[in-house]
Structure formats: C-alpha cells, structure tokens
Amino acid sequence: MPSAEVVEATKKRVRDAVVLFEHKEGSKSVDIKEIPSLVRYLGVNPTGVQLTLITDQLASLNADSGTDNTSLLSSENIESVVSNFLLTQEASLFRDDYHTLIRAFRAFDPDGKGYIEAEQMKVLMCSRGEPMSEDEANKMLVYAADENGRIFYEDYAQRLCTDGRRI
C-alpha cells in the first residue's frame, strides 16, 4: 500500500489534469471521450483494455449518480477511479526509457538514415499492435514530425523521455 503522501500526490495530479480537460472552464466535469487523453497526460501508456476498464467504471459510476448528461463525468469520480488505477497498476505503466525507444525506432530505419517517414509511421501505428485511431496518429505526428514529414527519432525519443511526466 502506498504511503499517504504518495496517494495524496497522485490525487492532486489527477485533479490538476481534470482542470486541463474540463468540458467547460470551471465545470469540474470531463467528457468521457477525453478520459484516454487525460490518463495519457498523466505520463502513462495504458493499453486499450485498461482504458476501456477505466471508462466503463466511470460510466457505471456516472449512471449510478442519476445525472442527465451521461457523457460528462464528475471530477470526484475521475479522481477516485484514475488515482486508484495509477496506484494499483503502477508497475505496469512505466514508460520505456530512451535506449529502448531508440532500438524500437531503428527497427523501422534499416538504412540508418536517422529518421522515419511520418506517413510510414502513421500506417504502422494505425494497423499494427494496439492500433491508434487516425485522429490519435495525426495528433502524435504533429508533435513528432518536422515540416518535411520526417520523424528524427533520436530527438523524438529524447522529448518523450524528458517531457516532465512521471508516475
């Protein structure tokens, strides 16, 4: 069981994230569609199954509360469910380190050019492993690719590892 300080720090991080993802400023509610982005914002990479479990649990709590708008979730429910998830699943949520990311990117760069074409990466992300939606892939590529449509993976891996997120 984590210490009281760790629990409170985790809850505060979730509360701060809720403010960023609020449906309307000051509403203290978040659209259920934003929950995967909110969880990832907290610096973890949950699987689709884990995200489904979180959103299902939140939807169930929301339905039990008898609110009219079933897509808007209260900050209290989000704090409870997401904090519990982060605290109980901590070991499985750590991000890969820089060297692991570089090895993975190099697998897609057999010529050793130092970059991957953004369109090639988009096709891979939308069709392999746990596929991303096209919208998710486009958002990622805005951050990852340069103006010529190339992902210089050493720079990108560095940004992923040092973006200030932590568990």
Image (cartoon, rainbow, N blue to C red):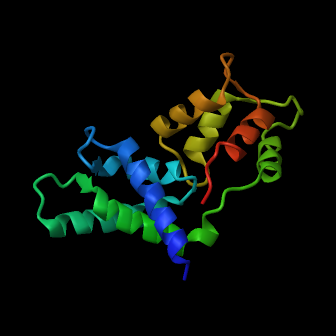
Q: Nearer the viewer, residue 72 or 114?
A: 72
**Residue 4 position in % (x across, y down):** 50, 76
Can residue 49 be seen?
no
Q: Residue at x 63, y 28 (%)?
A: 119
Instruction: Give the farthest residue toward the top.
Output: 148
Q: Is residue 58 above or below residue 164?
A: below
Closer to the camera in the image, 161 or 49: 161
Q: Is residue 157 left or right of residue 9?
A: right
Q: Quadrant of the C terminus?
A: bottom right
Give the left or right position of residue 35, taking residue 152 as reference.
left
Q: Nearer the viewer, residue 10 or 59?
A: 10
Residue in the picture at 60% in, 36% down: 123
- Name the one closer to the observer, 119 or 150: 150
Q: How many marks?
A: 0
Provide residue 51's location: percent of width, then percent of height: 44, 60
Q: Position of residue 127 (x, y in %)?
A: 57, 45
Q: Residue furthest front?
A: 5
**Placement of 30 over or under 159, stated as above or below:** below
* Left-right relation of 166 to 162: left
Image quadrant occupied by the N terminus: bottom right
Q: Position of residue 94 (x, y in %)?
A: 65, 62
Going 21% across and 63% down the picture, which residue do you hit? 62
Residue 35 seen in this snapshot: yes
Q: Residue at x 26, y 42 (%)?
A: 26
Q: Residue furthest right?
A: 112
